[in-house]
């Protein structure tokens, strides 16, 4: 059986080992850093509209309000559509107190608040989904040559909703249509979960956190081939269960807590010796 083993008993690092039986075939080490907000999604509220900057300021729960320019605001949030030929005035299409879903594009810096956008990007293992922006999409600029055309055709074969855009990441090169479809379905389920959470609470609050080490580990390494995910830290285990329960609940039974306190997880599967010899 293929397994994902998550060793999180040391605060300074989180280790993710991919094993087939007791044979190690991939290892990833995450170093949990200070809390970052970049790519996190929040439900916020417009606190001030500044026509001279063509921008709004958003209370999204941070100490400083975020900066949201008009060009980063989807028309779905306009309180009225401008008429043909009418010059777009920010005060005419938005109002203070209006709730809005935003994603952090740039972290707070100095005295400046975070830069925000309403055009959401959700990163998967092979794809990046833009669920409310169909005008962007395609193939990563890092993919060149014959690979670019092959990947472009694979993207065209995906059944992407008309209102959405999608980019194939470099990790998507050489992946089968089934693998890309699995990643797309995962991202669509994330977006569906986000939409459901957004309507349940008033702003401001954190809707979706990108920065969690275990979430990234599960997102980037989990596949249908994995029989179980064993995690040796109770808080990390609960975090993984919460994530999987929201975005792929049919796999929740694969997330398991490793309870044996006498034999460490990596020792049980003879991983430590393999790490020392391989790395």
Image: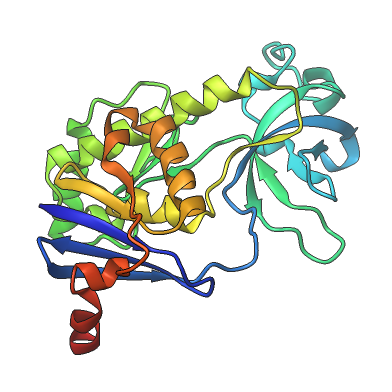
Looking at the image, can residue 155 be seen? no
Looking at the image, can residue 12 be seen? yes
The residue at 22%/68% (across/down) is 268
Q: How many marks?
A: 0
Q: Is residue 4 above or below residue 101?
A: below
Front position in the image: 100 or 53: 100
Q: Is residue 23 above or below residue 230?
A: below
The residue at 37%/56% (across/down) is 217
Image quarter (top left, top right, bottom left or bottom right) of the C terminus:
bottom left
Residue 257 drawn at (x, y percent) = 36, 49
Residue 67 drawn at (x, y percent) = 78, 45
The residue at 58%/68% (across/down) is 33
Q: Is residue 278 left or right of residue 105?
A: left
Residue 1 drawn at (x, y percent) = 10, 52
The image quadrant that residue 30 belongs to is: bottom left
Front position in the image: 101 or 94: 101
Front position in the image: 155 or 45: 45
Residue 250 drawn at (x, y percent) = 28, 28
Q: Is residue 74 left or right of residue 225?
A: right
The residue at 22%/74% (across/down) is 271
Q: Is residue 107 above or below residue 227?
A: below
What colouring method underlies this structural image?
Answer: rainbow
């Amino acid at each position: 059986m293929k397994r994902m083993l998550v060793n999180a008993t040391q605060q300074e690092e989180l280790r993710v080992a991919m094993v087939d039986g007791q044979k190690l075939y991939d290892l990833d080490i995450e170093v949990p850093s200070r809390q970052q907000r970049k790519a996190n999604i929040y439900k916020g509220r417009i606190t001030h509209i500044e026509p001279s900057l063509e921008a709004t300021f958003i209370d999204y729960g941070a100490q400083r309000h975020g900066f949201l320019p008009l060009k980063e605001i989807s028309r779905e949030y306009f309180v009225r559509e401008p008429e043909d030929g009418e010059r777009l005035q920010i005060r005419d299409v938005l109002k203070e107190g209006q709730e809005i879903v935003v994603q952090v594009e740039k972290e707070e810096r100095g005295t400046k608040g975070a830069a925000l956008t309403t055009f959401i990007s959700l990163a998967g293992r092979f794809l990046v989904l833009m669920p409310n922006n169909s005008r962007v999409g395609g193939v990563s600029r890092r993919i060149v040559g014959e690979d670019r055309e092959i990947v472009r055709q694979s993207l065209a074969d995906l059944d992407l909703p008309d209102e959405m855009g999608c980019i194939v990441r470099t990790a998507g090169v050489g992946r089968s249509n089934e693998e890309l479809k699995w990643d797309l379905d995962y991202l669509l389920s994330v977006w569906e979960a986000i939409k459901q959470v957004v309507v349940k609470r008033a702003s401001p609050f954190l809707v979706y956190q990108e920065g969690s080490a275990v979430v990234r580990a599960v997102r980037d390494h989990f596949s249908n081939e994995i029989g179980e995910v064993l995690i040796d830290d109770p808080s990390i285990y609960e975090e993984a269960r919460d994530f999987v329960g929201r975005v792929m609940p049919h796999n929740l039974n694969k997330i398991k807590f490793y309870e044996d306190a006498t034999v460490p997880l990596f020792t049980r599967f003879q991983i430590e010796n393999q790490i020392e010899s391989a790395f």
